């Protein structure tokens, strides 16, 4: 599905890596769509447009590597990132998780996605309630 999406910042392989990582973190189930099902990866440019150029270079390298590796190895990389004994990698974990969860919970979906959006699936609704005087 990633091949449909074009990014001004990320290559196809990097987009594939982002989608793999997203599906590992948000695999979906009977009540929630997976990261890739929503097509939210199509909005990656919205999330990376203001990233520091040095950080973007590092992110692109990580996503490119993950795009080329099989899913079990990407899962292992994410497992290493989550270890407390490697502080620098925990910062990378924090950044990757922020990107993936921001895209997913932005509630933006690809136009071809017909399923329930994440906000609907969790019952999240913003409404303005007028306070009585």
Image: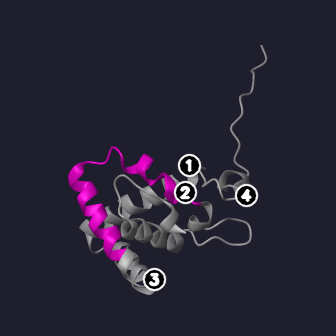
What's the CA distance linking mark 1 and mark 3? Answer: 25 Å
Find residue 71 and name its label. Answer: 3
Q: Distance between the residues labelled 4 and 3?
A: 26 Å
Is residue 99 found inside the magenta-colored segment of the image? no
Distance (Cα) linking label 4 and label 1: 14 Å
Q: Earlier in the sequence, mark 3 or mark 2?
A: 2
Residue 89 in the figure: left or right of residue 37: left
Badge 3: residue crowd in 10 Å (few <14, some 14–19, many ≥20): some
The percent position of residue 114, horizontal first and vertical second, equals 72, 58
Q: Mark 1 points at which residue?
A: 106
Residue beneath the point at 33% across and 43% down: 50
Image quarter of the N terminus: bottom right
What span is colored magenta in the figure? 39-66
Determine which quarter of the picture holds residue 115. Answer: bottom right
Residue farthest along the top direction in this orientation: 133
- Earlier in the chain: of badge 4 and badge 1, it is 1
Judging depth in this view, the residue of 64 and 92 nearest the camera is 64
The residue tagged 4 is: 116
Is residue 14 in view?
Answer: yes
- Front-most of 92 and 84? 92
Q: Are marks 2 and 1 in contact (CB under 8 Å)?
A: yes
Q: Mark 2 points at which residue?
A: 40
Q: Say above or below: 14 vs 125.
A: below
């Amino acid at each position: 599905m990633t091949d449909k999406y074009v990014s001004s910042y990320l290559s196809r392989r990097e987009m594939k890596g982002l989608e793999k990582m997203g599906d590992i973190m948000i695999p979906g189930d009977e009540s929630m769509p997976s990261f890739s099902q929503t097509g939210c990866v199509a909005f990656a440019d919205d999330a990376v447009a203001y990233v520091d150029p040095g950080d973007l270079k590092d992110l692109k390298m990580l996503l490119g590597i993950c795009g080329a590796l099989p899913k079990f190895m990407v899962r292992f990389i994410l497992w290493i990132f989550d270890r407390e004994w490697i502080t620098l990698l925990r910062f990378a974990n924090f950044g990757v998780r922020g990107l993936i969860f921001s895209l997913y919970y932005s509630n933006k979906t690809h136009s071809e996605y017909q399923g329930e959006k994440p906000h609907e699936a969790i019952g999240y609704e913003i409404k303005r309630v007028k306070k009585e005087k």
